[in-house]
Amino acid sequence: MNSIVNSHQGMFMACLFLLIPLLGAAGCAGQEEWDSDELVAVAAQAHRVQSGEQLFERATFGGNGRRCATCHSEETGTISPADVQARYAANPHDPLFRPIDSDDGVGDSYTRLLNEATIRFEFPLPPNIWIQDDPAATSVTVFRGVPSVKNSPALDPLITFDAREPDLETQAANAILAHFEPTVTPTQRQLEKIADYERTLFSSRELRRYAHGGPEPELPRGHTRSEKRGRKHFLPNGVCGQCHSGPMLNTSSEQFPFGAFTRITGVLTGFSGEVLGTSEVRPTPNPMHRYAMACPSDGSGLLCSNPDLFFPLIAVYQPRLENGVLSMLAADPGSALVLGTLDVLGDGKTTSLWGINETAPYFHDNSAPTLEDVIHHYKLAFEAAPILAAPILGGRSTLTAQEEADMVAYLKLL
């Protein structure tokens, strides 16, 4: 009997602890009356969150030992090469190290995982898209970093890089299926609990408050001269702010020359230094392929009807239109596999900048180890496509060293 009472007391205290952020400061201060039905509903939500945390931390679904927490750390919501290397040194049999993510697929070595912290993804090719250098292929394998589960689940409807998943529950189900090698299928109720828990994860109190109806987070003013100079680049008309605007710094502004409120854009990662017009050795986590698509007979294909639209990026994507077939280069096809068109080849969601200093490495393929590498990548991209750069940079085609340093200094404040 005592054990039952203690169990109920423990559950009550856990729910009470989880209730505090859900009730909010107004309720705690007595500024708002909560009726019994509301309290019961909030308590039930708190219990779902607690159950979801247990599933997130412990559930393997009878698979290879992996759990959600295997790849999504408590500290950052993701994993870095340093995290992976430390875990391998401590235990080479850690569930993170499974043959499906080894170099050869059978578990003999994990060099890529150790150095890049990328996970293997295999996606089916749409029926109208094929790989010219491997025309028999029905799927493509790409390696991507682990997106952080902080902030995004509660505040961003676009869940994955390619916006493939319609909701958190579906994303969790597909992640378990792809990476856990499960023998037990998670129930819809379990998936909902995991999603409820993920919606409670934030990188700051400001974002937690915003998720619960509080004020929009504001750009910090900056303290040093470099930070204050850097801030101007993140205003809606700034170099960075044109793509990273809005409350979550993940939506294009009205000043963006290619359309306001855009969430899917290209980042030009994965291209060699030669393609980007530099002698620098550039990271290429994914093999480059030439993807091809038969142009729609109704003329609806944007680039098929006007291939000159890609002229500014001709040196990068190298588009070709031959006999009604459009082909282009890309390392990771991104949203093209979801939408079934090369018009968005290589494109992916613009991620939030909040908390970015804690989530290295960067880009969907982890190709930028540091924030300095991120900004320098865009400098090279601007130089490779000056016609695109000009409207963003006010007629210029590159960044100065001072601008790069100031942008990095400001990013570290977010």
Image (cartoon, rainbow, N blue to C red):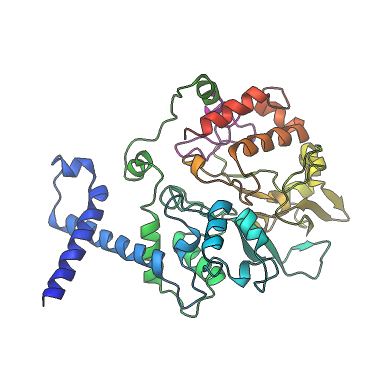
> Residue 131: horizontal and vertical position, in percent?
79, 62
Say if 116 sits above or below 51 in the image: above
**Residue under the point 67% across and 25% down:** 401
Vertical side of 136 occupied by 388: above or below: above
Report the residue at 41% width, 74% height from top.
Answer: 187
The one of 91 and 362 positioned closer to us in this rendering: 91
Query: Is residue 327 highlighted in magenta?
Result: no
Residue farthest along the front direction in this orientation: 90
Q: How many marks?
A: 0
Report the magenta residues as a range: 232-260
| Residue 219 falls left or right of residue 383 | left
* Residue at the outermost right position: 323
Q: Is residue 142 above or below residue 104?
A: above
Residue 164, how many percent across, how many down?
57, 58
Q: Residue 292's spot in the image, x, y percent?
A: 79, 58
The residue shown at (47%, 51%) is 157
